Amino acid sequence: MEGQVSAANTRIETEVKEKTQLLATQQDLQKHNTELSGLVETLRKEADEAKTLAKNANDEYTRIRLDLDKLNGEYSANLISFKELQDKSDAMNTQIAAVARRIPNIELIGSGTAPPIDAVIQAVRNEEKLVVLSVGKEQKVQEGFQFTVYRGDKFVGKVQVIKVYEDLAGARVLYTQDGEAIQVGDQAATQL
């Protein structure tokens, strides 16, 4: 009977050790579960904040896109108006030139003192909007004179003299026809 009691005690001790180990493991698992629950909650909050930031960014993008569309519309309308005014100006300049050819001694209002001078574009720097004309002081060119630039019978643009040398002049591009760029070899004249 003593052997049975001893075996029972050993079995009880073994079961107590196993139960103690199981309780320790259970406590570790509960601790890890608490830590993981906290981490999940933190990640959930961060995800909610990220969603809010994404929504705000999307709203801002939409607002900027609408503003850009509005500005593009205004820009297009202004380009159309500018083109119409430019066409009217070109037509008026052509009419003024026709009148001046018929009546050579007429003093046109706004014609300034620029005599009729024909030139050729010798160099172009599109980035700086500068050109070099083939005429200068020898042809009576002065700063401020404006030249109409054309290619064949096609209007290309308008330039204004900013620096005069003996036989050439530097000019700033005032504007060009839509889709056109002033090129070396284009013709230029103070009067059409």
Image: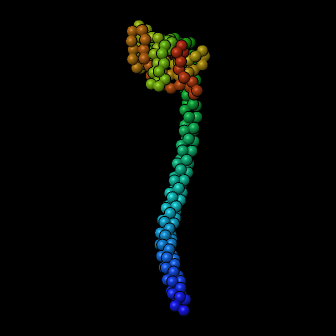
Q: Is residue 111 left or right of residue 73?
A: left
Image height check: is 65 above or below 131? Answer: below
Image height check: is 171 above or below 86? Answer: above
Position of the N terminus by quadrant? bottom right
Q: Is residue 164 left or right of residue 124?
A: left
Residue at image location 49% in from the left, 23% down from the top: 126
Is residue 11 at least partly visible in the picture?
Answer: yes
Q: Nearer the viewer, residue 98 or 51?
A: 51
Point out residue 70 in the picture as x, y percentages from the top left corner: 55, 45
Point out residue 128 in the picture as x, y percentages from the top left corner: 45, 25
Image height check: is 11 above or below 106? Answer: below
Q: Nearer the viewer, residue 110 or 126?
A: 126
Image height check: is 75 above or below 98? Answer: below
Residue at image location 44% in from the left, 19% down from the top: 171
Find the residue positioned furthest to the right.
153
Residue at image location 60% in from the left, 19% down from the top: 154
Point out residue 92 in the picture as x, y percentages from the top left corner: 56, 23
Q: Is residue 178 left or right of residue 144?
A: right
Is residue 30 at least partly visible in the picture?
Answer: no
Q: Quadrant of residue 187?
A: top right
| Colouring convention used in this rendered image of the protein | rainbow
Q: Nearer the viewer, residue 93 or 142?
A: 142
